[in-house]
Image (tube, rainbow, N blue to C red):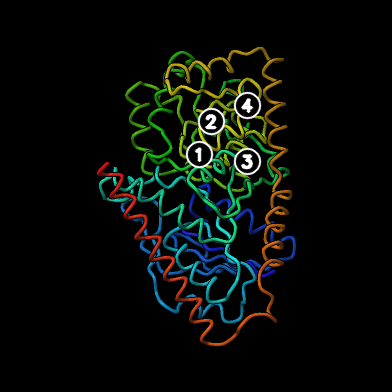
Amino acid sequence: MNILMMTNTYLPHVGGVARSVAAFTKELRRKGHRVIVVSPEFDKAPKDEKDIIRVPAIQHFNGSDFSAMIPIPGLLESHLQDFQPDIVHSHHPFLMGSTAIRVAAKHETPLVYTQHTMFEEYTHYVPVDLPKMKPFVVSLCTGYANMADHVIAPSHSVARILKERHVKTPIETIPTGIFIDEFEQGDGHAVRDSLNIPREAFVVGHVGRLAPEKNLDFLSEAVAIFLQDEPEAHFLIVGYGPSEKNMLDLFTQRGLQNQVHFLGKKDGQDLVDAYHAMDVFAFSSKSETQGLVLTEAMAVGAPAVALDASGVRDVVQDQMNGYLLHDEQVDAFAEAIKKICRLPQSTRQHFITEAKRTADNYSMKNFASKIVSVYQKLLKSHVTDSDKDESVWHKSIEQIKAEWELFSNLTSAVGEALTESTS
């Protein structure tokens, strides 16, 4: 199959969507499919990328680490002249998502949409009145999902939310898988040695974008309480983003700077080694659809302490592979970390074993096969080439319909936001 992946974020951006698209692309190519990824330009992106189309974009949109594409009519089609997509797979409902609707209409191919993100939790990146933005974004995403031929939810909890929001398009739950074998071998001792962390010390770890929507003020406060109670323990943070300074300031103010280590961006074996240096994985985000880093941490045997939220509850099983906290209380979160720290080795081994068992259920090979199955079913149910009306008139009508659907979805979302703000 020829598969066109269209996303607003892609490597080397650090984030779940970029890594998900990259992981599925890698496995689909390994299975023999041709996959082209369309993504905005991004700082430090490789210059010799194969089957990656970069479109012009505004870097660091509104102070974030995201790129916002600049629409240039006809640019993409000039790159797709020799590539006739069988499937268009959109990973966002706006910007590149709108382009995906147009490309699918032009080529008369099925459109698959993955709801990677609860976008209403990201409205702080847009300088508009927040109470109006949240219902607008929810309505826009719901409308977009209903324009697709099939929707992928990364977790069962997200699938339930989409159905509650009246998404009528068929939904299938397919999490982003991980390459289990890549996480089996790692040198956590080398990471500890490089940071002067004793090999016997208890290390709390966190991996991800350091941004406000990840609830990092809460996480920092909870870990600080734990570190004050356990002066021999350490906190290892992998990632970067706008919240890094606030986190560093908090730990410095508490006199904990010697117990806290910011590694910045890591990938490949360096990331795996960092995971292997962790004894427990701390995760406080409430805006996840899956929490890919949770399964990666569990693949190396690190149990998790996390807040109960969509996506997270699908992975973390309370008192089995970690602790899942239903109440957002800093003291309780710190206490849960302390519990794992002070567990007898035999009991902690139970958590480690269960964590690895959970990760085994998230094999990328299995989930990529499920994605292929969705594609194949759509192609079988789609109009065959011999039955298509190839006239210029028919193609024009299809593109007009796509533009009308995009316009209708936008106006409907605006109406929902205005109604919500006045009620």
Q: Which residue is mark 3?
A: 272
Q: Dots 1 and 3: beta carbons under 8 Å? A: no
Mark 3 neighbour class, 10 Å CA radius: few under 14, some 14 to 19, many 20 or more? many
Q: Dots 2 and 4: beta carbons under 8 Å? A: no
Q: Which residue is mark 4?
A: 317
Alpha carbons under labels 4 and 3: distance apart? 23 Å
Relative to 253, residue 121 above or below: below
Residue 399: image location, x then y, percent: 48, 76
Q: Which residue is mark 2?
A: 205
* Nearer mark to the viewer, of 4 and 1: 4
Question: Which kind of residue does numbered mark 3 sit on?
Answer: Val
* Mark seen at residue 117: none
Dot 4 falls on a residue whose secondary structure is: loop
Alpha carbons under labels 2 and 1: distance apart? 8 Å
**Which comes sooner in the sequence, label 2 or label 4?**
2
Residue at horizontal 35 percent and vertical 26 percent from the top: 252
Q: Dots 2 and 1: beta carbons under 8 Å? A: yes
Residue 369: image location, x then y, percent: 73, 54
In this view, the residue in front, 368 or 148, is 148
Mark 4 neighbour class, 10 Å CA radius: few under 14, some 14 to 19, many 20 or more? many
**Which comes sooner in the sequence, label 4 or label 1?**
1
Q: Which residue is mark 1?
A: 238
Dot 2 falls on a residue whose secondary structure is: strand
Alpha carbons under labels 4 and 1: distance apart? 24 Å
Residue at horizontal 67 percent and vertical 18 percent from the top: 348
Residue at horizontal 53 percent and vertical 78 percent from the top: 79
In this view, the residue in front, 147 or 363, is 147
Question: Which kind of residue does numbered mark 2 sit on?
Answer: Gly
Alpha carbons under labels 2 and 4: distance apart? 18 Å
* Nearer mark to the viewer, of 4 and 3: 4
Dot 1 falls on a residue whose secondary structure is: strand
